[in-house]
Amino acid sequence: MSNLTRRAALVRIVVAGGAVTAAGFGIFRFARRSPGHSPSAPPTPAGQPTADEPPGPLSPQTLATLLAATEAIIGVPIERDHYANFLRWRAENLAGYRALCDRFAEALERAAGESAGKPYVACAAAVRLQLADAVTARAPGGLRIAFESMRRQLLVLFSRTDAYLAAGYDGWAGVPRGFADYQHAPRVARR
């Protein structure tokens, strides 16, 4: 029998666990790498905005079109200022995002003009949703992926904010509602 102390056993377990983890990460990285893959220069699909396009402010027309699209995509009343701030910040701080917003808004306006004969903002919510779906589906490969990503980001923002209001809560998660509100269930009449 060997004289293995508790400390030596723990050291061996930690070393073995580290070796298994390192081997797992190595296999994972090897499996993810495809032939001809160059991590320094990933290809940009045609039509998709690149990081070379500078960030900047959104035009009022573009912002109005995107907010109308957001209302149509989400389908319930939202706090427009919250989504406007989200879109403005991303356009002003992320390279390529303003160009993506401009392209999405232009495509929505073009589709609304062709099908409804009026601006996108003036269309009914159901028509705006159909147009947003059609524009996303018709976009070429890389741009379609970017449009779908933008829609997903807006839905994630909704799920973290306005979905709570739609479910009947007085505020979003993490938003203080005052001492009295913590003593009572949401929307319960107080005496």
Image (cartoon, rainbow, N blue to C red):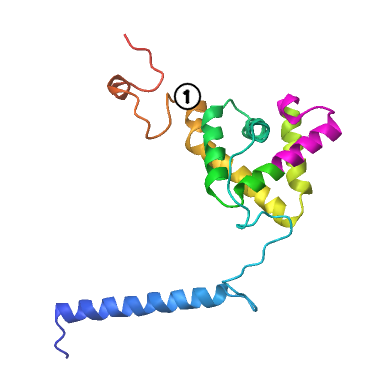
Does the magenta-highlighted stretch encompass residue 137?
Answer: no
Q: Quadrant of residue 109?
A: top right
Picture quarter with the C terminus: top left
Picture quarter with the N terminus: bottom left
Query: Horizontal and vertical percent for residue 36?
Result: 65, 78
Per the rendered image, the range of residues in magenta is 104-125
Question: Is the residue 171 above or below the residue 137 in the image?
Answer: above
Instruction: Give the left or right position of residue 21, taking residue 67 as reference.
Output: left
Question: Is the residue 110 above or below the residue 141 in the image?
Answer: above
- What residue did someone put label 1 on? 168
Instruction: Give the left or right position of residue 170, taking residue 129 as reference.
Output: left
Task: Work out which residue is located at the far bottom of the displayed protein and give it.
Answer: 1
Q: Quadrant of residue 46?
A: bottom right
Does the magenta-highlighted stretch encompass residue 105?
Answer: yes
Q: Which SS does the magenta portion mostly show?
A: helix
Question: Residue sitting at 66 percent across and 54 percent down?
Answer: 49
